[in-house]
């Protein structure tokens, strides 16, 4: 068993050990472990892992889970005299072929010996956000290859008339999710299950990093490998990753411009790039697309990149709190457009990834009840069965998100369980007024925080109020995720 020793304290060690233990518990319960465990061979991997014989490291890359960054990490760690940190290596100069590969070890016996002796590393990600990220990066952003192979195929499956498909660029997120759950999760590396791609139950990974804690996990990995972390600690991972995305997305789109313009106008190409950066939380939704009117002509890659870097700087200066919130909002809005049937199919497809790596399945499944909120620290619970109605505020005008709901003027009541301070929220406008409600019974539902979307509806209510058991429940005019559809009575409350 690998013993984690962390110079910064026990938090990293506990986190990494807990993940390994979660995986082991999952593996003990699946059917494969009840049969004879297969002989350890290099064929356990769907594609050949990246290795470093110098570091005695094996890393199994998975699409849409920091695989580009980790490729650069291995290159930088292997050649410390050339690079201070992975971000020094341009994305375009870090193809996987520049790394050693397990497949390049000729003899199978030698490959097996390396797998047994090496430090085996895997990075994972919350499955719902991974699917959405694939859509944003490959379909919303200009990319003729994925428009055809993902978008067009998803629209055909959805029985969109051939004449209306075009290049496949207008596929909706709901159509895409249906296609992923039916086919794409088996065939495309960006969407294959991690448990299929890297066979964690038989390989025995000692380090399981999460994209959500990338910086902390990479630093912990570096200490295990005895790789200097001085430069890495000085790097702002989020800002460096944002600048990577700005440059790579812009350069790629303009390299493909001739093919892109066969499908969309130059104006739409630029707007898609801009929207991608907003959805990723790199620039604020408040930053208007600059290339309109007289400025719309002759936009070059460098000119576009300069504008989007300026927008990034202004976003960080003027609207820093917007960026993580709008990223969450975009994900919720997108999944709010997907039918419950298709969401359940998607959850079923990625069940093993949820369970093996300790992610919650409930948040999206509980969209059957469909409550969207702005902050994961406030948990307003609906008094009746509820379902999300899409909230259009600041949503893209592109065809990937739901349309505004019709809103009734009938109010409903929220009671803050901690302060017993009732708040009446009118669906015709946000308001706050006193009420004569006294102390309430204990909460009728549990109120839980979740990584992506809050899931709160566990039991039937015992009164007619909305209850929260958190210390704060702020409702403001700036709330991003507000829509609650009260099915019983067809009331829609916008909070």
Image: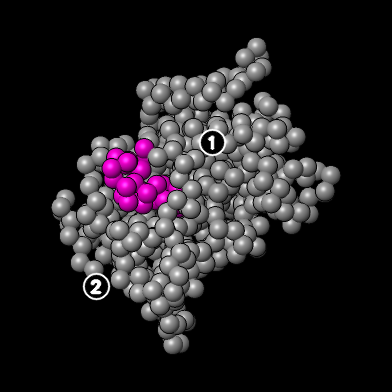
Q: Residue at x 48, y 32 (%)?
A: 246
Q: Residue at x 62, y 59 (%)?
A: 184
Q: Residue at x 61, y 31 (%)?
A: 254
| Mark 1: secondary structure | helix
Please give the residue where the numbered disc 2 appears in the rendered image.
1
The percent coordinates of residue 446 (x first, y second) are 37, 58
Chain part drawn in magenta:
65-88
| 162 vs 31: above or below | above
Q: Earlier in the sequence, mark 2 or mark 1?
A: 2
* Quadrant of the rendered image containing residue 170: top right
The percent coordinates of residue 362 (x first, y second) are 46, 60
Q: Residue at x 55, y 49 (%)?
A: 134
* Closer to the camera in the image, 457 or 264: 264
* Closer to the camera in the image, 24 or 284: 24
Name the mark on residue 136. Answer: none
| Mark 2: secondary structure | loop
* Quadrant of the rendered image containing residue 340: bottom right
Look at the magenta stretch and give its main secondary structure: helix
* Quadrant into which the N terminus falls: bottom left
The percent coordinates of residue 127 (x first, y second) are 48, 57
Taking the magenta stretch, the answer to whether it contains residue 417 is no
Instruction: From the viewer's perspective, tell me whether residue 260 is left or right of residue 456.
Output: right
The percent coordinates of residue 114 (x first, y second) are 35, 70
Please give the residue where the numbered disc 1 appears in the rendered image.
249
* Closer to the camera in the image, 344 or 292: 292
């Amino acid at each position: 068993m690998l013993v984690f020793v962390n110079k910064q304290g026990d938090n990293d060690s506990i986190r990494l050990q807990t993940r390994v233990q979660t995986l082991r518990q999952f593996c003990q319960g699946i059917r494969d472990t009840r049969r004879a465990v297969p002989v350890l061979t290099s064929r356990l991997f769907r594609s050949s892992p990246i290795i470093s014989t110098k570091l005695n490291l094996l890393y199994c890359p998975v699409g849409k889970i920091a695989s580009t960054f980790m490729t650069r990490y291995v290159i930088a760690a292997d050649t410390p005299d050339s690079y201070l940190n992975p971000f020094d290596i341009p994305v375009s100069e870090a193809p996987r072929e520049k790394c050693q590969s397990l497949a390049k070890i000729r003899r199978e016996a030698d490959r097996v010996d390396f797998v047994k002796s090496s430090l085996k590393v895997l990075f994972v990600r919350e499955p719902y956000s991974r699917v959405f990220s694939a859509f944003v990066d490959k379909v919303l952003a200009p990319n003729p290859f994925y428009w055809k192979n993902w978008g067009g195929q998803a629209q055909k499956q959805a029985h969109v008339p051939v004449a209306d498909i075009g290049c496949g660029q207008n596929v909706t997120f709901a159509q895409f999710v249906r296609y992923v759950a039916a086919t794409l999760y088996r065939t495309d590396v960006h969407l294959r299950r991690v448990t299929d791609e890297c066979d964690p139950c038989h390989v025995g990974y000692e380090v399981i990093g999460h994209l959500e804690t990338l910086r902390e996990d990479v630093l912990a990995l570096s200490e295990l490998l005895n790789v200097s972390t001085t430069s890495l600690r000085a790097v702002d991972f989020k800002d460096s990753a944002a600048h990577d995305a700005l440059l790579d997305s812009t350069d790629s789109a303009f390299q493909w411009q001739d093919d892109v313009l066969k499908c969309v106008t130059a104006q739409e190409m630029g707007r898609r790039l801009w929207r991608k950066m907003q959805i990723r939380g790199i620039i604020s939704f408040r930053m208007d697309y600059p290339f309109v009117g007289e400025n719309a002509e002759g936009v070059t890659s460098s000119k576009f990149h300069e504008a989007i870097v300026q927008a990034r700087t202004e976003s960080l200066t003027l609207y820093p709190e917007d960026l993580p919130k709008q990223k969450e909002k975009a994900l919720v809005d997108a999944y709010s457009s997907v039918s419950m049937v298709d969401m359940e199919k998607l959850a079923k497809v990625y069940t093993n990834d949820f369970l093996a790596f300790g992610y919650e399945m409930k948040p999206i499944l509980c969209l059957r009840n469909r409550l969207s909120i702005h902050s994961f620290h406030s948990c307003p619970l609906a008094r009746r069965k509820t379902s999300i109605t899409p909230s259009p505020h600041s949503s893209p005008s592109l065809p990937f998100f739901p349309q505004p709901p019709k809103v009734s003027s009938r109010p409903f009541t929220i009671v803050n369980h901690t302060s017993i301070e009732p708040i009446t929220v009118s669906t015709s406008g946000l308001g706050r007024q006193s009420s004569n409600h006294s102390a309430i019974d204990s909460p009728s539902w549990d109120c839980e925080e979740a990584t992506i979307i809050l899931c709160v509806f566990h039991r039937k209510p015992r009164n007619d109020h909305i209850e929260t058991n958190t210390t704060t429940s702020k409702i403001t005019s700036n709330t991003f995720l507000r829509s609650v559809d009260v099915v019983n009575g067809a009331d829609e409350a916008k909070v």
